[in-house]
């Protein structure tokens, strides 16, 4: 197999030769040149990893050439450029003619300075009136490279190139013969015609085989084409995640087994595929093979990249100590070799790894390599600007915005960093950074209570940028969108969105684990609402068995577990889980949103267990932190918890004023559970005020009836919110309260009806649990 030349490159040389003959008119010249440049020098993509890659086609088919040339006329009347191209490729009628073609192809190039001096000394006049290609132009460089590679071919390789060219041009024989009826030409070789042999003769079969066989095993590709194909596959795996499709894997194996010298990149491709599949031994082995071959064939400049890949691999399989050690060595070697790109990438990885696993970074922090968080981000931002690593700069800006958001600092500064990162993503075409940007935007809008913008950010990313972004970002964005839909009770849409992710996209082990975990979290929340204890416990056990290296998701599962224990009445266990979760929060992965949530849960547990005074200070502290950090949904939740504590202290007027003042903002969050809790508090507050009036002797006062009527209205509103999210306990509680109110107002018929409805809800809940 040839290292560079293929039949398609011979065809491109023929097209270049036609162009230099001056038969391509000016109206078609731009199109022809654009087509040639596209085939020979495809645009390079910005590298997103230490291994640079580019998107390119391996070969140009005859159909591509026909589509590009057939509609463009030539300078010869009645002939298109396609007709001239056919005449050119069929003029090469034997293997010897191919040798002559390559020997004379350099004539279309401008002569070298030495040749011009030699012609001048010999008294030869300079050639005029003919087109010549500059030797340094893209077309000239291709011609020189092709001629050089042909001279390096062994005889059997040049014969194989000729055989491939014969098969390559064979589909155009009938068209060419119809256009040129006077020329005698055999579809295979002019020598066969001279000897009177047809393609089915025994000698022809020995020399050319079954020339009309279209089996893919005889497709002709070069080593360079295989390298480009591997580079493209590696680029796709690195930028988008996932694995090599089965069909492409078969094609690659077939090409490699056809006789090409196996490039080193095939080991790296196998490493990436095995890594995505969760095959640790194979990925580790192929990684070592790739870098062993690379350092033997080149130099030791790639050693730091070997360590970098090894550290990422070790971290992905839970070997955190080994990962940190390998990354530290990579940092040291990158510094020694002054490889700033690798160094910046390593420092960025260490920063994000430290945020996810702070306990593993104690040794690194003791060395002062990164400094504190803000110093580390400032260093990365400065170095990214110096080396023009725009992807790293965008990621650093988003990390800075996320740090400020988690610490409850300036929202304006967070927005500024997100907008700056967005500007970089758009102007520098950083498709890999768009996903984290929209995920952070979604989180920011959710934290300040603008739920519709949060949902819109997720939808914009999923509709407009998902095809060019890593699948993991798409998966997280889908989950975030489903969370916003689930809190509104739109479970059918949640199921439809999660089902849109086909199994083909989940062939990567990590993606599959994330999808299972996200789906399980959404189902767990729904089963908790439906009071299906068996299903909830089963889902919880499965989710706890999946160990994902994502602190945010782990905390979300912990909060759902605490909520389940509270609903089951296991308050001691729930309080223990709150304390345990709080202890796991490290300073390096601290999030003020989680702190407020845990304070609210603890205050609620204390209030439910008869210690409202202890819960009062916690709820007030949570509200103060949420207000200072502008966490508006958390602020409304804190005020609701505070109102529940005040109810226990019989401060009914205060509760009514508190909840009514924030009710519009609560409804804007589109959180049915929070809205239902607020309405339920208003019910209790108004009934408490009515009871106070009754105790003062105002049995039939208008004010008392007004508060009871308000309570009935709020009961209906709370029931509707609980019904939206299928919260059975909440619905039963509202129906029981309404039955009690009907009984107190002297309407036993309605009271009995609501009591019967309560029993029906309980019975239906048990039936649903049995069906599941």
Image (cartoon, helix red, strand yellow):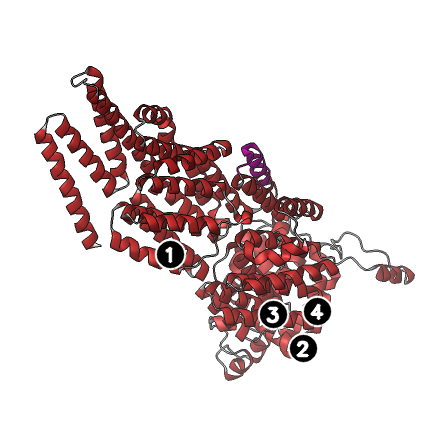
Measure the C-alpha gap from mark 2 to mark 1. 55 Å
Q: Is any atom of residue 495 visible in this view? A: no
Rendered location of residue 428, percent (x, y): 61, 44
Measure the C-alpha gap from mark 3 to mark 4. 12 Å
Task: Tell me the quadrant of the picture where the C terminus can be found.
Answer: bottom left
Q: Which residue is drawn at 18% across and 36% down?
A: 736
Q: Which of marks 2 and 3 is nearer the N terminus?
A: 2
Provide the residue designation for mark 3.
290
Helix, strand or loop at mark 1:
helix
Q: Which one is in front in this view, the residue at disc 1 or the one at disc 4? A: 1
Task: Tell me the quadrant of the picture where the N terminus can be found.
Answer: bottom right
Q: Main secondary structure of the magenta part?
A: helix
Q: Neighbour class for label 2 at 10 Å: few (<14), some, many (≥20)? A: few
User: Which labelled disc corresponds to residue 516?
Assistant: 1
Which of the pair 393/606 is nearer the observer?
606
Q: Neighbour class for label 4 at 10 Å: few (<14), some, many (≥20)? A: few
Which of the pair 671/691 is nearer the observer?
691
Which of the pair 433/75 is nearer the observer?
433
Query: Dots 2 and 3: beta carbons under 8 Å?
Result: no
Provide the residue designation for mark 4.
298
Specify start and end residues of the magenta stretch as a single range.
Answer: 408-421
Measure the C-alpha gap from mark 4 to mark 2. 25 Å
Task: In the rendered view, tell whether residue 163 sits above or below residue 45.
Answer: below
Q: Which one is in front in this view, the residue at disc 4 or the one at disc 2? A: 4
Q: Is any atom of residue 443 visible in this view? A: yes
């Amino acid at each position: 197999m040839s290292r560079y030349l293929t039949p398609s490159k011979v065809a491109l040389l023929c097209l270049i030769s036609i162009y230099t003959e001056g038969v391509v008119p000016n109206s078609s010249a731009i199109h022809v040149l654009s087509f040639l440049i596209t085939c020979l020098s495809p645009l390079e993509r910005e590298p997103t990893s230490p291994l640079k890659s580019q998107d390119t086609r391996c070969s140009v088919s005859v159909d591509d050439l026909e589509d590009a040339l057939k509609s463009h006329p030539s300078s010869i009347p009645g002939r298109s450029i396609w007709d001239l191209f056919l005449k050119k490729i069929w003029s090469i009628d034997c293997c010897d003619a191919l040798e002559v073609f390559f020997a004379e192809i350099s004539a279309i190039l401008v002569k070298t300075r030495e040749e011009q001096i030699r012609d001048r000394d010999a008294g030869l006049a300079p050639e005029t009136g003919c087109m010549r290609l500059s030797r340094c132009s893209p077309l000239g460089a291709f011609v020189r490279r092709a001629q050089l590679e042909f001279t390096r071919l062994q005889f059997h390789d040049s014969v194989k190139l000729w055989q491939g060219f014969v098969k390559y041009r064979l589909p155009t024989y009938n068209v060419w013969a119809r256009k040129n009826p006077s020329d005698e030409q055999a579809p295979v070789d002019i020598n066969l015609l001279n000897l009177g042999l047809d393609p089915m003769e025994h000698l022809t079969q020995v020399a050319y085989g079954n020339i009309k066989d279209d089996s893919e095993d005889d497709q002709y590709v070069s080593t360079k084409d295989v390298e480009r194909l591997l580079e493209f596959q590696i680029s796709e795996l690195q930028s988008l995640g996932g694995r090599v499709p089965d069909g492409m894997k078969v094609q690659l194996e077939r090409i490699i087994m056809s006789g090409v010298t196996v490039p080193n990149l095939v080991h790296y491709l196998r490493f990436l595929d095995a890594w995505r599949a969760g095959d640790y031994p194979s990925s580790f082995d192929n990684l070592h093979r790739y870098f062993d071959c690379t350092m033997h064939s080149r130099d030791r400049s790639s050693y730091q990249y070997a360590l970098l890949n090894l550290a990422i691999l070790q971290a992905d399989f839970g070997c955190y100590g080994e990962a940190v050690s390998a990354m530290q060595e990579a940092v040291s070697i990158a510094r020694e070799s002054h490889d700033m790109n690798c160094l910046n990438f390593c420092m960025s990885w260490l920063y994000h790894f430290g945020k996810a696993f702070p306990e593993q970074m104690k040794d690194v922090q003791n060395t002062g390599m990164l400094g504190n968080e803000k110093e580390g981000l400032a260093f990365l931002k400065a170095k990214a600007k110096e080396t023009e690593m725009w992807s790293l700069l965008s990621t650093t800006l988003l990390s800075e915005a996320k740090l400020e958001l988690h610490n409850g600092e300036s929202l304006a500064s967070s927005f500024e960093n997100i907008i700056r990162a967005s500007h970089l993503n758009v102007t520098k075409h950083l498709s890999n950074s768009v996903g984290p940007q929209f995920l952070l935007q979604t989180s920011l809008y959710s934290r300040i209570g603008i739920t519709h913008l949060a949902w819109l950010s997720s939808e914009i990313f999923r509709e407009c940028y998902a095809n060019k972004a890593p699948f993991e970002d798409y998966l997280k964005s889908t989950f975030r969108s489903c969370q916003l839909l689930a809190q509104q009770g739109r479970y059918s849409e949640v199921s439809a969105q999660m089902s849109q992710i086909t199994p083909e996209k989940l062939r990567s082990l990590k993606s599959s684990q994330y999808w299972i975990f996200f789906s399980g979290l959404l189902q767990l929340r729904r089963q908790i609402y439906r009071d299906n204890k068996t299903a909830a416990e089963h889902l919880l056990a499965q989710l706890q068995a999946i160990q994902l290296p994502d602190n945010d998701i782990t905390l979300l599962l912990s909060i759902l577990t605490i909520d389940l224990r509270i609903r089951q009445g296991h308050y001691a266990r729930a309080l223990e889980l709150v304390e345990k979760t709080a202890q796991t929060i490290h300073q390096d992965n601290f999030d003020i949103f989680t702190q407020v949530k845990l304070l609210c849960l603890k205050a609620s547990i204390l209030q439910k267990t008869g210690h409202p005074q202890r819960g009062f200070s916690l709820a007030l502290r949570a509200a103060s932190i949420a207000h200072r950090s502008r966490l508006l949904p958390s602020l409304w939740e804190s005020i609701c918890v505070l109102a529940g504590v005040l109810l226990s202290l019989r401060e009914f007027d205060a509760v009514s004023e508190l909840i009514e003042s924030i009710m519009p903002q609560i409804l804007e969050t589109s959180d049915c559970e929070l809205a239902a809790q607020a309405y339920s508090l208003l019910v209790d507050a108004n009934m408490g005020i009515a009871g106070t009036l009754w105790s003062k002797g105002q049995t039939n006062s208008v004010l008392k009836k007004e508060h009871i009527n308000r309570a009935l209205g709020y009961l209906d509103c709370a029931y509707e919110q609980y019904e939206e999210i299928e919260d059975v306990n909440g619905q039963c509680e509202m129906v029981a309260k309404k039955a009690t109110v009907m009984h107190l107002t002297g309407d036993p018929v309605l009271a009995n009806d609501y009591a019967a409805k309560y029993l029906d809800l309980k019975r239906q809940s048990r039936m649903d649990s049995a069906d599941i």
